[in-house]
Image (cartoon, helix red, strand yellow):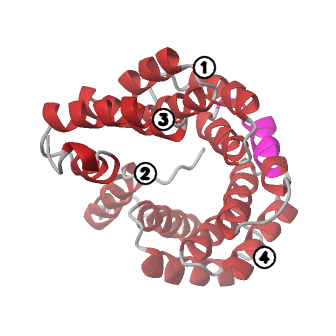
């Protein structure tokens, strides 16, 4: 079963626990009950991580790993927990263990790639990891998004565009990838295409604000200011737009 860090795991765990508490007949064998208990604790660890309850997730995972040291999913997940807590050396060891135990664990490669980007590693080791993850799970759009962002921060915009387009082929409604692609088009000075991606990636006020930022990054401060002000007019509660107006349009006043 493919595992992702999202809220649905918590519901699965709670339903299963309630079902066990009500059962009074047809008691399964002890070994089967032990397997079920392990699975439930594993799902709970995923649920805690999905809700960013890192300390609670770590406690569950360390206990599970002590009992089941050859489970690559556990090592990959605690690698992510360590990474999110800034424990980079422990995270790298955990990802390496997961890959050693299961060389086809795409999530471990993707997690290690993110670690290398967050840690600021020099070179393209993160890109190698992201490509490995994509090779193992080509339909997982998030891995292509990670690769696209890695290319973007290195100024390799054509490669970033190709990676994000591939990710959107699998997840066409991903707002994150749409916005990332919009910023890539901004760097390529294809602002009409950037605008379309921003419109697919958020509300009209968010699209105006993002387009303003793309234009500002290109050096067109006047056009950027116009879009920031439009975003703030459409939605006076959009804090990012209001801050951009104050920062980028000082000659026009601090509010639209």
Q: Which mark is residue 100?
A: none
Q: CA distance from mark 4 to mark 3?
A: 38 Å
Start-end of magenta stretch? 129-139
Q: CA distance from mark 4 to mark 1?
A: 33 Å
Relative to 48, is 33 on the left or the right? right
Q: CA distance from mark 2 to mark 4?
A: 24 Å
Q: Earlier in the sequence, mark 2 or mark 4?
A: 2
User: Considering only vertical position in the picture, is 223 above or below 29?
Assistant: above
Q: What secondary structure is found at the residue carrying circle 2?
A: loop
User: Considering only vertical position in the picture, is 11 above or below 31?
Assistant: above
Q: CA distance from mark 1 to mark 3?
A: 24 Å
Q: What secondary structure is found at the residue carrying circle 4?
A: helix
Q: Is the Cβ of the residue at disc 1 closer than 8 Å to that at disc 3?
A: no
Q: Residue at x 80, y 51 (%)?
A: 129
Q: Which mark is residue 169?
A: 1
Q: Which mark is residue 93?
A: 4
Q: Nearer the viewer, mark 4 or mark 1?
A: 1
Residue 113 position within the rendered picture, expressed as x and y whole percent measured from the top left: 73, 56
On the image, numbered disc 3 is attached to which residue?
A: 214
Residue 44 position within the rendered picture, expressed as x and y whole percent measured from the top left: 44, 66
Q: Quadrant of residue 236?
A: top left
Q: Quadrant location of the C terminus?
A: top left
Q: Residues within 10 Å of mark 2 (few under 14, many from 20)?
A: some
Whether residue 48 is visible: yes
On the image, numbered disc 2 is attached to which residue?
A: 6
């Amino acid at each position: 079963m493919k595992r992702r860090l999202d809220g649905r795991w918590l519901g699965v765990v709670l339903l299963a626990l309630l079902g066990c508490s009500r059962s009074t007949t047809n008691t399964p064998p002890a070994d089967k009950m032990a397997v079920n208990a392990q699975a439930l604790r594993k799902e709970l660890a995923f649920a805690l991580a999905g809700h960013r309850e890192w300390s609670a997730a770590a406690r569950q995972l360390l206990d599970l790993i002590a009992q089941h040291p050859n489970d690559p999913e556990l090592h990959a997940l605690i690698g992510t927990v360590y990474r999110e807590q800034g424990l980079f050396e422990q995270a790298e060891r955990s990802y390496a263990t997961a890959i050693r135990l299961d060389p086809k664990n795409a999530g471990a490669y993707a997690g290690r790639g993110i670690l290398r980007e967050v840690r600021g590693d020099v070179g393209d080791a993160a890109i190698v990891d992201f490509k490995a993850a994509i090779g193992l799970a080509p339909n997982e759009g998030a891995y292509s998004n990670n690769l696209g962002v890695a290319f973007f921060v290195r100024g390799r915009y054509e490669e970033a565009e190709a990676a994000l387009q591939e990710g959107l082929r699998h997840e066409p409604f991903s707002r994150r990838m749409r916005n990332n692609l919009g910023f890539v088009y901004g760097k390529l000075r294809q602002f009409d295409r950037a605008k379309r991606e921003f419109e697919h990636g958020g509300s009209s006020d968010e699209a105006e604000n993002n387009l303003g930022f793309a234009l500002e990054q290109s050096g067109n401060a006047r056009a950027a200011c116009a879009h920031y002000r439009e975003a703030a007019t459409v939605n006076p509660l959009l804090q990012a737009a209001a801050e951009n107006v104050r920062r980028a349009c000082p000659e026009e006043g601090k509010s639209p």
